[in-house]
Amino acid sequence: MALLCTATRRNFRRTFVRLIIDSHLDLSWNALSWNRDLTQSIASVREAEADMTDDDARGHGTVTLPEMRRGGVAVCCGTFLTAQRDTSNDT
């Protein structure tokens, strides 16, 4: 829980708000591998992928930045995925 304090000339109010933290989110994978524009709404992304047939997951995107904001996510720890380069043939 986080404490949010607001003050005006006449009153002081304390409100406790629950912070939502997502600590495993593949934002980079969604943006780079799926070529999704995460600044758009999830509806826009799904609509743009509606006719794509390269994978069954197309049109079923799970998250975008505006949807996270709308859902009240306060902190996101993105996951970075990398590919290992085969160095066995390097001289």
Image (cartoon, rainbow, N blue to C red):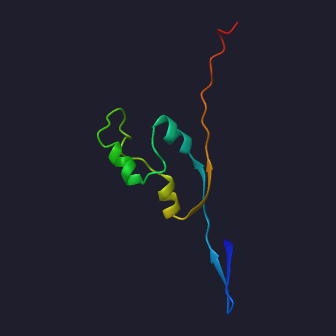
Q: Indicate the quadrant where residue 82 lies.
A: top right
Q: Residue at x 46, y 45 (%)?
A: 37
Q: Residue at x 49, y 63 (%)?
A: 70
Q: Indicate the quadrant where residue 52 lies.
A: top left
- 19 relative position to 50: left or right: right
- 18 relative position to 60: left or right: right
- Residue furthest to the left: 51
Q: Is residue 59 above or below residue 43?
A: above
Provide residue 39's location: percent of width, then percent of height: 48, 50
- 11 relative position to 55: left or right: right
- Residue furthest to the front: 9
Q: Residue at x 64, y 77 (%)?
A: 16
The C terminus, quarter of image: top right
- Name the foreground residue: 11 vs 59: 11
Q: Residue at x 37, y 35 (%)?
A: 55
Q: Indicate the quadrant where residue 12 lies.
A: bottom right
Q: How many circles with numbers are drawn on the protein?
A: 0
Q: Is residue 82 above or below residue 37?
A: above
Provide residue 15's location: percent of width, then percent of height: 64, 80
- 52 relative position to 7: left or right: left
- Name the foreground residue: 43 vs 1: 43
Q: Is residue 35 above or below residue 77?
A: above
Provide residue 76's location: percent of width, then percent of height: 61, 54
- Residue furthest to the bottom: 10
The N terminus, quarter of image: bottom right
Q: Is residue 23 above or below residue 13?
A: above
